[in-house]
Amino acid sequence: MVEISRDEGRRTFGADPRAYHQARPEYPPEVFEILVHRCGLRPGLATLEIGPGTGLATRHLLRLGAYPLILVEPDPRLAEFLTGHLELARRNVDLRVETFEHAPLPRRAFGLVCAASSFHWLDEIVALEKVGEILHPGGWWAVWWNSYGDPRRPDAFREATQEVFRDLDNSPASGYDGRPPFALDHDRRVERIRSVGAFTEIRSETFRRRVLFTSAELRALYATFAPLARQPPDDRSKRLDLLARIADEQFGGRVEREVLTPLYTAQRSGTSGGE
């Protein structure tokens, strides 16, 4: 098995944006409470979101008053869905269809830069350095994911469905060399943030919840995971049918999964008067 390239991964999720949007669970409210109370999200805060996808996090940024809001989304199909779904033109949101690494963005312009379930598709150090450049001193970086199952705990459904993922390539979200998955590798993520030398007040925390999925909901959710989404339609359907059959026959068609949401926040060092 090899790792799916970042360029390919960025093009994986736009094939059926509506299905992606409907299948992916919401992020827990604690994330947005922290954006408000720790990171200063409020009406009039200049904000940038990296890889908004179908807008699962974007709509909460809008609800909480982020403005001006710039969205950088590399997939034009996702950008088109996002524009219609959230009526971005009416809301005067600046949506840029390009990669974050290559997007021309003003220095020290933002009070908040964030990414939800997208940051593993970027070159981490390059992206963090750019985040440090575009945040004004005292501004905040926040990045989070939804992760399905805790690799440190027994997971009957994960064990039962290993065959579904046999011979599939890994995404950058996977863990390697005995390390946890990207989102749950707290030591590595904090070390990388610290290594660019632009941040202070670095914190990581994880929110846990139990979510009950029907076999149909699991089939739809797993269809959005990169290793399956990029497969030829016939192979993908066979694997998803197998997954749904396992859920039906071994778990009675209803599977309770632990959903973890790791959140990392860091404040741009320096003060508004200079560094």
Image (spheres, rainbow, N blue to C red):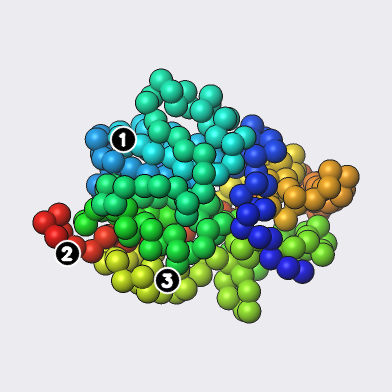
Total number of numbered labels? 3
The residue that mark 3 highlights is 192
Local packing at callout 3 (Cα closer than 10 Å; few below 14, some 14-19, many 20+) is some
Q: Are marks 2 and 1 in contact (CB under 8 Å)?
A: no
Residue at 82% across / 64% down in the picture? 167
In the rendering, at what x and y percent does residue 234 appear?
A: 88, 45
Q: Is residue 91 visible?
A: yes
Residue bearing the label numbered 2: 275
Q: Using a 10 Å C-alpha cutoff, classify the residue at mark 1 as few (fewer than 14 neighbours), some (14 to 19) or many (20 or more).
A: some
List x then y, in percent, for residue 86.
48, 27
Q: In the depicted view, which residue is nearer to us: 15 or 161?
A: 15
Percent x, y for residue 75?
59, 41
Query: On the rendered image, what quadrant is the N terminus found in?
Result: bottom right
Sort mark 2 into few (<14), some (14-19) or many (20+) by Cα contacts within 10 Å. Answer: few
| Residue type at numbered disc 1 | Pro
Q: Is residue 71 left or right of residue 217?
A: left
Q: Nearer the viewer, mark 3 or mark 2?
A: 2
- Secondary structure, mark 3, is helix
Whole-number angstrom distance, CA of label 2 to CA of label 1: 24 Å
Would you name the residue on which mark 1 appears? Answer: 68
